[in-house]
Each structure stands twice: as structure tokens, then as C-alpha cells.
Image: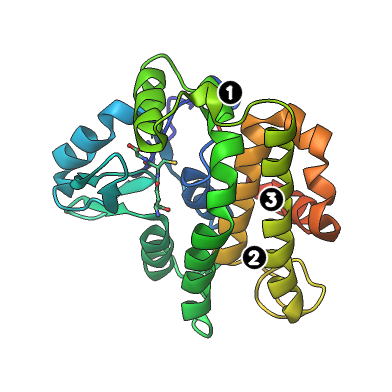
Amino acid sequence: MSAHAVEPKITLFDIPSICKPQAWSGNTWKARYILNYKRIPYKTVWIPYPDIEKTLVNLGGEGKATSKRADDPTKPLYTLPAILDETGTEAVLIVDSVNIAEYLDQKYPERPVMPNVGKALEFAVEALFTSTVWPLAVMPLLPFADQIQDERSQPYFRESRERVFKKKIEEFSPEGPIRDSQWKALQEGLDKFAAVLDKNGPNIYFVRGGINPTFADFLLAARIRWIKTIAPEEWRKRGVEQWSNGRWGKLLKSLEPWESPAE
Ligand SMILES: N[C@@H](CCC(=O)N[C@@H](CS)C(=O)NCC(=O)O)C(=O)O
């Protein structure tokens, strides 16, 4: 940043990695894509997993957990992405990517990502994808996500995931027939999801006939991009780009202009 540049007043809290560029998470990428697309100046603060809760609580986010811990449902789960908006007299902390998308659209109405017509559908895509396709990605992909964590996050990531699934991360997706069948199931899940999207016709974006991306597109791209970033060899070997008649590859390509900055 040059000596005269003004420090952005919006902060995106993201999770670090050893990837280059660093941004990797299929959740935080939703907010990052949207900030980039809306051309809102922001800075990134990298928070390793074990520090997420205390960071958000320190910023006034007590009680703003987005769900319960899978390894101990009596405890709240604080998650990223989060943004802190310090453009006004009082700092505003927003957590959860759909809330971030809604908030940014209200505050910066240009280049909307939550269309007034069909807003419920944008929310529905998130819920449907998370409950149908996402579980199929967990076993084959978590071992790769484990490998790209930074030093501080890695023990937390591994221990919490091993506690949830009650086995070593190395046993999640052993190479051979088990791993192959997991990837096949993921492909079939994505194909089924693509068949739903195809009802809108051949256009890349979610909104029927839409020429601009909306939240649903950024959400899907963030998830697919996660696979590509953490498991590039599997991505190539399994030909993910060509899955579902090339839908996912085309979506990522069309959103490339908003991949930067990824830091
Ligand atoms: N629905 C949430 C999900 C966010 C989420 O699950 N984030 C993960 C990072 S990929 C997280 O922060 N997990 C904290 C943990 O596992 O302790 C959103 O989109 O904001």
C-alpha cells in the first residue's frame, strides 16, 4: 500500500493456510468473492482456527455463533467468514456469509448479489447444497484440508475432525477403491445438483437468463474452488472441471475476475 493510500475500513476475517495465495476456505471465499465483485475496498486479517472464537467475542460477537460444535453440541461454534465494518461511528460485526451478502447489498447497493426477486431461492441454494452435496465432500477432502493448515491451526483442525468422525484423518479416505467410490459419490451428487440448476436453461449463472452472478453462484464457486485449491492433483486426475457437462469449470472461469485479491 502506498504512503498515501487510505487503510480500508472493512476487514474480512479469513483462515490462513500454507497455499499461495492463502485464501482456501469454501466458506470464507463466499464473502471474499462478493467483496471483490462489489469492488468494496477491504483488508484481510488472518485468524487461525483456535483463535476464531476469542477474536469474534473480543469484537463484540458474543452470542453470534453460527451453529453448535459437531464434536460437542453443547458448545457454540464461532465461524468465519466475518466482516468488521468501521465506516460508521460504531463498528459493525457481521458473521455468516448469507448475512454478510445481505448486509453488503444494503450498505453498498451497487452490483447487488441478493436479487430482490428470488432472494429466498438464493438462501435455499445454500441450504440445499450444504445438506445434500457438502456431506459427500467431507471424507475425501478433509485430509487435504488438513495438509494445508498453518502451524497453529493444524493440531486443532485434525483433533476436532478426528473427534467428530471417531477415526484418524488418514483413515477418512484411504487410497484405492474407498477413495474412488467417495469421489464418484461426490461427482454424482454434483451432477444431481447441476440437473436442478439446468432447469433454468443453459446459462452459467443461477438467476434464469441472468448475465450477472448472484450469491448462489459465489457460494457454489467457493465450494468448488475449495476442492481445486486444496486437492489440485485429485482435481486434475478426477477431471472435476469437466463434471456435470463442464458446469463447474465454466462457473469458476467466469468468476475469475473476482478471485483477486486472494492474498
Ligand atoms: N454458514 C457459515 C459456515 C461457516 C463455517 O463453517 N466456517 C468454518 C471455516 S471453513 C469455521 O469457521 N469453522 C470453525 C471451526 O471449525 O472451529 C458461513 O457460510 O458463514
Spot occupied by residue 221 in the image (x, y as percentages of width and height): 64, 52
User: Callout 2 environment at 10 Å: few (<14), some (14 to 19), or many (20+)?
Assistant: many
> Label 3 is placed on what type of residue?
Ala
Spot occupied by residue 123 in the image (x, y as percentages of width and height): 47, 71
Q: Dividing the picture into quarters, in which one does residue 160 lie?
A: top left
Q: In which quarter of the image is the C terminus?
A: top right
Nearest to the observer: residue 113 or residue 192:
192
* Residue 123 appears left or right of 73: right
Q: Residue 213 carries which label?
A: 2
> Label 1 is placed on what type of residue?
Cys
Q: Is mark 3 within 8 Å of ligand 1?
A: no
**Labels 1 and 3: the sequence-earlier one:** 1
Where does label 1 land, which residue?
19
Check the image and report above or below for 128 versus 156: below
Where does label 3 land, which residue?
185
**Labels 2 and 3: the sequence-earlier one:** 3
**Labels 2 and 1: the sequence-earlier one:** 1
Label 1 SS: loop
Distance from the alpha carbon under mark 2 to that under mark 1: 26 Å
* Residue 101 appears left or right of 92: right
Residue shown at 19% from the left, 33% from the top: 54
> Label 2 is placed on what type of residue?
Pro
Which quarter of the rendered image does ligand 1 occupy?
top left
Residue shown at 41% from the left, 62% from the top: 98
Nearest to the observer: residue 185 or residue 19:
185
Residue shown at 78% from the left, 50% from the top: 249
Spot occupied by residue 34 in the image (x, y as percentages of width and height): 52, 55
Check the image and report above or below for 141 versus 70: above
Counting the numbered discs, the total is 3
Looking at the image, can residue 198 be seen? yes
